[in-house]
Image (spheres, grey):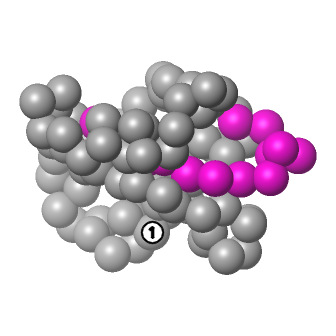
Amino acid sequence: MCDEYGYEILSLHISPDHVHLFLSAHPKHAPSKIVRTVKSITAREMWEQHEQFLEEYLWGGGFWEESYYVGTAGDVSTDTIEQYIERTEHV
């Protein structure tokens, strides 16, 4: 997916109830479109690979919540953001 859309995953942390994803993308890609793309493709893949399990645990068929948070790096270094994502105490 990243190659196809020109995204680069810089850091990723998966918790039981949320995901922290730090990625780089060309400024022509709106953050909301990036989130929509990532959620759509990952949900479709999860359903294709784990349909029986997900049907048992997800009522109504939704894999992702509609909400999300997007922030930009601005003056913060990539290393600082990656260190935050790697920390476990924010889980």
Residue 71: x and y in percent read: 57, 26
Q: Residue at x 30, y 36 (%)?
A: 84
Left or right of residue 59: residue 87: left
Q: Is residue 71 above or below residue 39?
A: above
Left or right of residue 8: residue 12: left
Left or right of residue 61: residue 54: left
**Location of residue 46 (image quadrant):** bottom left
Q: Is residue 44 above or below residue 74?
A: below
Is residue 20 visible to the viewer in this orientation of the structure? no
Quadrant showing the C terminus? top left
Magenta residue check for 20: yes
In the image shown, does 37 or 71 lie closer to the viewer?
71
Left or right of residue 88: residue 72: right
Helix, strand or loop at label 1? It is helix
Q: Which residues fall within the magenta stretch?
A: 18-31
Residue 38: x and y in percent read: 56, 53
Residue 70: x and y in percent read: 56, 28
Residue 76: x and y in percent read: 54, 30
Label 1 neighbour load within 10 Å: few <14, some 14-19, many 20+: few
Q: Which residue is mark 1?
A: 45
Q: Residue at x 73, y 41 (%)?
A: 33
Q: Amino acid at mark 1?
A: Glu
Q: Residue at x 18, y 27 (%)?
A: 90
Is residue 72 visible to the viewer in this orientation of the structure? yes
Q: Is residue 46 above or below residue 27?
A: below
Q: Residue at x 48, y 58 (%)?
A: 10
In the image shown, does 33 or 47 lie closer to the viewer?
33
Q: Is residue 75 above or below residue 33?
A: above
Quadrant showing the N terminus? bottom right
